[in-house]
Amino acid sequence: MRVDRVVNGERQLMTPHEIKVTLAAKSWHTLTVEHRGEDIKVFMGKKRVFEGKDRTYTEAGRIGVWIKADSLTYFDDLTAEELK
């Protein structure tokens, strides 16, 4: 797993390296991203797998989810909400 940002159409890696995450196959999993100000936290289920800071985008905006071409992945119930 990795955390990226896209600036001027160019993907930039935010994590120092790929994050090793082992998930059970053929099961649903919950991915949560919290972005408050410059603080970013990423969770798989209830386990925090990434925490960092980024000042690139300070206003609410768009989100995206990207999966490598060699993966078979389904997404359901994608939601975004403003965190106070």
Image: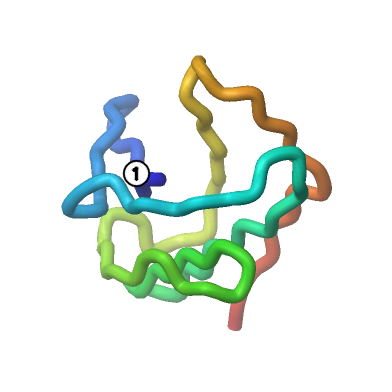
Which residue appears farthest toward the top when viewing the image? 69
Q: Is residue 48 above or below residue 3?
A: below
Q: Is residue 36 above or below residue 5?
A: below
Residue in view at x 47 percent, y 68 percent? 35
Q: How many marks?
A: 1
Q: Taking 56 as reference, is 70 left or right?
A: right
| Residue 55 x %, y % | 26, 63
| Residue 16 x %, y % | 17, 53
| Residue 52 x %, y % | 29, 69
Residue in view at x 56 percent, y 38 percent? 65
Q: Taking 6 as reference, is 24 left or right?
A: right
Q: Taking 26 as reference, is 34 left or right?
A: left
Name the secondary structure under disc 1. strand
**Quadrant occupied by the N terminus:** top left
Which residue appears farthest toward the bottom when viewing the image? 84
| Residue 45 x %, y % | 63, 67
Towards the viewer: 83 or 47 = 47
Which residue appears farthest toward the left when viewing the image? 16
CA neighbours of label 1 inside 10 A, class few (<14), some (14 to 19), many (20+): some
Residue type, label 1: Asp
Residue in view at x 52 percent, y 73 percent? 47
Residue in view at x 21 percent, y 48 percent? 17
Pointer 1: what residue? 4
Colour scheme used in the picture?
rainbow
Q: Which image quadrant for residue 72?
A: top right
**Quadrant occupied by the C terminus:** bottom right
Towards the viewer: 50 or 5 = 50
